[in-house]
Image: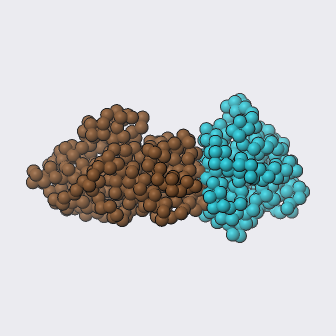
Chain colours: A cyan, B brown
Amino acid sequence: MYSNDQLKEVSTQVRRDILRMVGIAKSGHPGGSMSSTDILTTLYFNEMKQDPATWTRDGKGQDMFILSAGHMTPVYYSVLARAGYFPVSELATFRSFGARLQGHPSIRKGLPGVFQASGSLGQGLSAAAGLALGKKLDKEDNFVYCLCGDGESEEGQIWEAGMFAVFHKLDNLIAMTDWNGKQIDGPVDQVAGEGDLAAKWEAWDWNVIVAEGHDFDSIKKAFELAKAGKGSGKPTMILFKTEMGHGVDFMAGTHKWHGSVPKPEQLEDALKQLGETSLGDF
Amino acid sequence: MKKYIDTGKKDTRSGFGVGLLEAGRADSRVVALTADLKGSLKMDAFAAEFPERFIQCGIAEANMVGAAAGLAITGKVPFIGSFAEFVTGRVYDQVRQEVAYGKANVKIASSHAGVTLGEDGATHQTMEDLALMRALPDMVVINPCDFNQTKNATIAAAKYEGPVYLRFGRPSVPNFTPENEEFVIGKAQILNEGKDVTIVACGHLVWEALLAAEALEAEGICAEVINMATVKPLDEEALVASAAKTKAVVVAEEHNMAGGLGEAVAGALARALPTPVEFINGQDRFGQSGTPSALLAAYGLDAQHIAEAAKKVIARK
C-alpha cells in the first residue's frame, strides 16, 4: 500500500507527464486528466488487483478498469506507464503516427492495460457492466472499475447502463465520476443543467458515495466503502468532487483547459509549480 | 435447371432461434442478450435452457451493445438480438466503437430486416442496414436465405472469432437448403449453373431468384443463380468466374441501392471484370405498411422483376 506521501509524489509526476505529453503532442486533454489524477493514481497504485506482468485483455483473475471518458488519455497512459504496463519513455509518443498511445484508448495497437476502445462518450459504463456481468457468470471475485466524466453523464446511455447494472445486481462494479463541474463549452450547470448527480444515482438505486477527489484519505475511504458494497446486490458510484486542471494555478477551476495545450512558457511555469519528483520525467 | 423443393415455409428468425440453441449447447461461452424482444427474436428456447446465459437488457439497445462488448472481452460469445433497425441505425456509433473498432467477438442478430417486416411500416423496415454494417472495417455481414441456412449461419457465426452481423427476417419463406449443411463464411453457393446471365441474390430474394430462373428457362434463357449469403467478405472469385462465363449480372437484395450487395458486386466487377449489371433493390426509398408479398411486388423485388432485369441485362451484352 502506498502512503499518502508516496501517492502524492506519483500524482505530481503524473501531472508533469500529462503536461509534457500534451506539450509534445501539441494536442490532448489536460484539464480532466489533472482533475482525475489523484483518483487514478490511488486506484492503480493502491486498489486494483491487476498485475502488469500477467496482464491480458480478458482480465481473467484480475480487477479491470475502463476509462469511459476516453479523452483523458494523458492521465491514463501516464498512470499505466508509471505502474509498469509499458516503458515511461513511450509517453513521448503520445498521439503521434504509429504510436500505441492513440489519442483515445485503442485496443488495436496492443497497448498493455487497455481493455476497450473508448472516447465516444457515454459508452464505457455499459462495457464495464458487461465485464462485471462476465465476471459474475464466471464466478470471479474481482472488481470492475470505470471512470466517467460529469459532462459525459449527459449521455443517455450512462443511465441505461445505470438501470442495467442494478437490474443484474452488479455489486462488483465500482463506477466513478470525475465531478469537476466543467465541460468543453463551460460549467456543467450552464451547459446542460445536469443537477445533483448524487440524487440522480441514488434515485437509480446505486450505492452512492461522495468523496473529495484530491484528498487521498477521502479517496481511500471511498474505495473501502465501495468494496464493502459487495454482497449488497448494488453497484457503487463514487462521485469524486474534483477541480479541472488541479495542481497548476492558471489551469485550475476553468473549463478552458479541457482540451487546450499550454504554450512553452506556460508549460515551464506549470512544471515549476508542480516541482520535480524522485521518479523523474520520461 | 436444378430443382429446389420448398420443405415448408418457415421464418428465418426461427432458424436463428434453433441455431442459437444449438450453438449454446455446443459452447458454454455463448450468451444471448435482447432489448425486450426475446419472443420476436425466437430466443425463448435458449432462455429456457440457459437462464443464466440469457441477459435481458430492457428497451435500451445502446447499453446492450456495450454490455455485449464487455462480455466478449471476458471471453463470452454474445449474440445481441433486436429488430434490424435497432441493432444498426439506432446504435451505429456503439456498434462502430465497441464492437468493430473494439474488435469484440459480438454477434449482431438482426431480425425483421427489409420491407418484408410488413405491416409495421417504414419506421421498423430498415433498407439501409447492410450499407451501415458493410462500411465497418472487420465486420462480417451475412444475410442467409431460409430457415435452414439461417440456423447453420448462426452456428458458423458462433464459431467465428470476431464481429458478425447476421441479418434475417420476419415472414415465413420457402425452406429449401439442406438441413445441416455447414455454412462457410465468405463462400458463395452456386444454386444453379447457367450460361446466359448470372443472378446474384441474398436473403429472402434468393428464392425469388430461383423462381425467376425457372421462368427464364421456360423462355430458353439459362440463368446461373448465386446465393451470396455472405455479403462481406464478398466471394469475388465465385462472382468473377460466373460473370466471365455469362457476361451479364443481376443483383437482387431486399435493401436500398446505396451500400448494399448491388454496389458490392458492381465494385468487385468494376475492378476485376467490367460487366453489365442490373439492380433489383429498393432503390432510394422508405418502406410502408402492407403484406410481405404485396411489398415485394410493389418495391420491384419479386421473381417477375428479377426475370425482367435478366432479359434487360442480357440485351446490354
Q: Is residue A119 above or below residue A9?
A: above
Q: Quadrant of the N terminus of chain A?
A: bottom right
Tell me where residue A97 appears, x and y as whole percent.
59, 58
Residue B137 place in picture, x, y as percent: 47, 55
Q: Position of residue A212 (x, y in %)?
A: 83, 44
Residue A4 appears left or right of B161: right
Q: Left or right: A77 with respect to B278?
A: right
Q: Nearer the viewer, residue B243 or B99?
A: B99
Is residue A22 something one can see in this rendering?
no
- Residue occupying the point 59% across, 50% down: B67
Percent coordinates x, y for residue A48 in the rendering: 76, 59
Vertical comparison of A268 with A181: above or below: below
Front residue of A179 and B10: B10
Looking at the image, which residue is at 47% across and 50% down?
A: B44
Q: Is residue B204 above or below residue A198?
A: below
Judge by depth and name the residue closer to the eye, B179 or B150.
Answer: B179
Residue drawn at point x = 38 percent, y = 60 percent: B152
Q: How many marks?
A: 0
Q: The C terminus of chain A is located in which quarter? A: bottom right
- Residue furthest front in the image: B48
Q: Is residue B88 left or right of residue A55?
A: left
The image quarter in which residue B123 lies: top left
| Residue B153 shows up from this direction | yes
